[in-house]
Image (spheres, grey):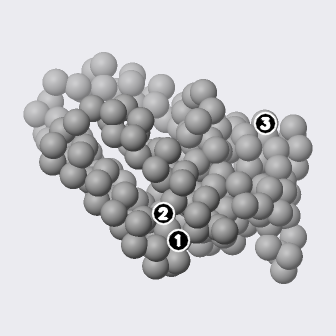
Amino acid sequence: MSQSLSDATPSSASPPTIIELFIAFSIISLSGFGGVLYWSRRMLVEQRKWMTAAEFNDAYALCQILPGPTIVNLSVVFGRSIRGLPGAAVALAGLIGPGLVIVIFLAFLYSIFGTIDALQRMLTGVAAAAAGLIISMTGKMAEPLFEDNNWLVYGVVLAVFVATGLLRWPVWWVLLVLIPLSIVIAWRAQR
């Protein structure tokens, strides 16, 4: 990463307290249905300004290669960088706790009312909204990539879209070729 996560807090703002970490990650948890990446970026970068867009992308990229769900990894990495082990535990509890209670309650209700057609149609609509949030988030996360006007980046993005979206090539083939290419492009751009 270009900066360590401990440098993620802007100098003009004080680091979040344990309570603020718990509240922020609880809000992220309660805001997302079908995924919380959009809400985590919005909370950490846009609303609280605890990270810049580039720092969020760096942290997110790191958390993707770690085992487990990326957003869970992000909560632990961010919480630990701000408040140590207690921060990691509190951010994780804020992220998982409220959602766990709601899911258990909804599972109970679904076991009773799950066969109702109106409920099935409603869940289809919610899935479409979640897909829209993912598309929006992808655009926001891509913004820092295009600030350098490096035309090779545009080529890589187009190659990924064509290879996986249009040609339906297996993702691992595309990654096997384009990850080393992306590393070379990033390395050359920093020189």
User: So how many labels did they put on this image?
Assistant: 3
State whether residue 158 is above or below residue 148.
Answer: above
State whether residue 98 is above or below residue 10.
Answer: above
Q: Residue at x 60, y 27 (%)?
A: 67
Residue at which label 2 appears: 141
Residue at which label 1 appears: 144
85 with respect to 146 (left or right): right
Q: On the rendered image, what quadrant is the N terminus found in?
A: bottom right
Three-letter residue code for mark 3 = Ala
Task: Please state the horizontal and vertical placement of residue 55, each as a whole percent of the image.
Answer: 67, 62
Task: Please state the horizontal and vertical placement of residue 137, each as a whole percent of the image.
Answer: 42, 60
Tell which circle, 3 or 1, labels the residue nearer the N-terminal end: 3
155, 94: nearer the viewer: 155
Q: Residues within 10 Å of mark 3 (few under 14, many from 20)?
A: some
Measured Cα–Cα span from mark 2 to mark 1: 7 Å
Task: Please state the horizontal and vertical placement of residue 162, each as a whole percent of the image.
Answer: 21, 52
Tag 2 and tag 3, C-beta contact below 8 Å: no
Residue at which label 3 appears: 89
Q: Residue at x 73, y 43 (%)?
A: 77
Q: Residue at x 86, y 76 (%)?
A: 11
State whether residue 107 is above or below residue 46.
Answer: above
Tag 2 and tag 1, C-beta contact below 8 Å: yes
Three-letter residue code for mark 2 = Met
Q: On the rendered image, what quadrant is the C terminus found in?
A: bottom right
Outermost residue, left direction? 117
Mark 3 or 1, which is nearer the eye? 1
Tag 3 and tag 1, C-beta contact below 8 Å: no
User: Hey, which quadrant is residue 136 in on the image?
Assistant: bottom left
